[in-house]
Image (cartoon, coloured by chain):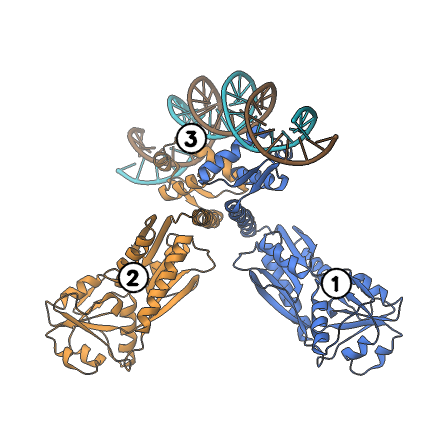
Chain colours: A blue, B orange, C cyan, D brown
Amino acid sequence: MKYLRTFELIEAVVRAGSIRKAAEDTNLTASALNRRIQSFESEFGWPVFERLPRGMRLNPAGELLMQHIRAQKTDLARVQSQVADLSGQRRGHVSVACSQALLPYFLPRQIAIYRAAHPGVTFTVNVRDRAQAERDLAAFSSDLALVFEPVHLVEFEVLFAMPQQVHAVFSRGSPLADKTELRLSDCLRHKLVLPSAAYGVRHLLELAAMRRGQTLTPALETESFELIRHYVTREQAVGFQIPIGLNASAQSGIAHRPLSDRDMPPGRLLLGQMKGRTLPVASAKFAQQLTAAMAEKSGI
Amino acid sequence: MKYLRTFELIEAVVRAGSIRKAAEDTNLTASALNRRIQSFESEFGWPVFERLPRGMRLNPAGELLMQHIRAQKTDLARVQSQVADLSGQRRGHVSVACSQALLPYFLPRQIAIYRAAHPGVTFTVNVRDRAQAERDLAAFSSDLALVFEPVHLVEFEVLFAMPQQVHAVFSRGSPLADKTELRLSDCLRHKLVLPSAAYGVRHLLELAAMRRGQTLTPALETESFELIRHYVTREQAVGFQIPIGLNASAQSGIAHRPLSDRDMPPGRLLLGQMKGRTLPVASAKFAQQLTAAMAEKSGI
DNA sequence: ACTATCCGATGCAAAAAACGCAACGGGTAT
DNA sequence: ATACCCGTTGCGTTTTTTGCATCGGATAGT
């Protein structure tokens, strides 16, 4: 879009940190770019950048402006998507920020279903911890977020909430497999394989342990849910995950069972968007599909 | 703003209904304007106007685009207002759509108070019936609406609700002045001076009359609240208004008293904005002031 | 303390974009 | 049939934007 070229140039300067570098990225000369920035600032009424000896940085007014620019860009995309929709075409792009738990089974299946119906729609999936996922929404870099136990919940509009009890994951030979009800205290007697602090499962475990006056000392702490699943087959240890990322029979050698809800209430897997935003058609439709799928899973 | 000149031109064409007329309004030639529209449409990806033998009209895609244009323009104004605010200046403009009842006392007083504190802020007050006030919000032509008993309430975000019992208005000599409790049936024995159907007071009266199996046959029906107030001093008649537009001792010759709430529950005077919109600083602050003033009035 | 380097800003000429003028073809109302 | 109003297009002119060369200032490294 030519008419918002100025905005793109401002974004480029923000990214590059200086006019000269941004000029290379945008195939312009520094002088031309400089004058566009200056003339915009004079129209806008206030300077938008701080001039530092090493380059340019947004001032507070500029931060406000950048919000506007991002909002305006995504809103235009939404309009184009709606127009494409009413023209009978179903095109568009969906960007999702999600927790790792959705990667193995849930999201690939849902995306495949959606794309089977609408091959013109493309997807971006960004793996984020729960805090970062919310920031992505606010920065318009993702349309939807699927996160377990989000942190802030400001600017986050919940589209669907799905209860998920934390499951213990262990090798098939583990003694934990025999209990009728799985208590947290049983698990804590084993070696622990825990996700790092940024994740909701860890957060819930810490809370539950604190209530019992205990502390968690993991033998292995990792950001990779995949590593957790595989590690418990190598050492007699217990990991923790939510069931949406687990599959009864898929991975040979591991088993999983829910923790007793006497020890820990179920967490919530939330589908959400940025508060007040109107999503592009494709994203809105995909959110509907996810909601239906989550509702069905919860019902069973 | 130069960079959104294209948007202004599109708006001008929409307003004028043809390129040639819009060209005059914008001090351009038809050819130049035509080419800007065409090049925009080609960038945008779809035609935005229908070409009719008598001019141009928005097609459905154009309607969607216009929403975007309006939203984007007001959002930019909001950003500028916020920037002005953080620069220590308090500039800006507030536009209010309101019912007639607010005109004699409430709004002039509130605007004067606000402007005494912030002389740089200017105001637009548009008198609208309750349906039109809500449409104004949705079209971004007003920031705030002050309406009695709004109609739709979709896209309308309530900022404050103030109960207002309908008052009967009559000349000081009227027999109604002597009753201890003013019943609707007492009023209906007199000649009626009623606001027209678009107004909330009339709506409430119709509802109350219907509950009693009666119909309202006004001697005088008008859109002017001012006329109602003055007419009751000329003929032995009774009018109806909400107290915020009345003042105990201001207008000589008229008196007013609330209807019994056995006949009619109080209506609600609502301060609202468009749902999900972030208001410019000046408008947001003024809304805060109005909220405080309404809360104080309700408290007494 | 000094120099090399990187920065944004500006004067001036060239290139690109926007514009105005005139004219064309098509539809409508009289 | 005619007059009128519409959007559209070719072409020469005007305005705006860009590239090049250069200046002055602040910093980092020596």
Percent coordinates x, y for residue C2 in the rendering: 67, 24
Q: CA distance from mark 3 to mark 2?
A: 44 Å
Crowding near the residue tagged with mark 3, few <14, some 14–19, many ≥20 C-alpha atoms within 10 Å: few
Q: Nearer the viewer's eye, disc 1 or disc 3?
A: 1
Task: Give the chain of mark 1.
Answer: A
Task: Give the chain of mark 2.
Answer: B
The residue beneath circle 2 is B99
In the rendered view, does A212 fall on the left or right side of D7? right
The residue beneath circle 3 is B31
Upstream in sequence: badge 3 or badge 2: 3
Q: Quadrant of residue A111?
A: bottom right
Residue drawn 40% across and 32% down?
A: B30
Residue A22 vertical placement versus B212 (above, below): above
The residue beneath circle 1 is A196
Residue drawn 39% across and 49% down?
A: B90
Percent coordinates x, y for residue B160 in the rendering: 39, 66
Mark 3 and mark 2 on one chain? yes
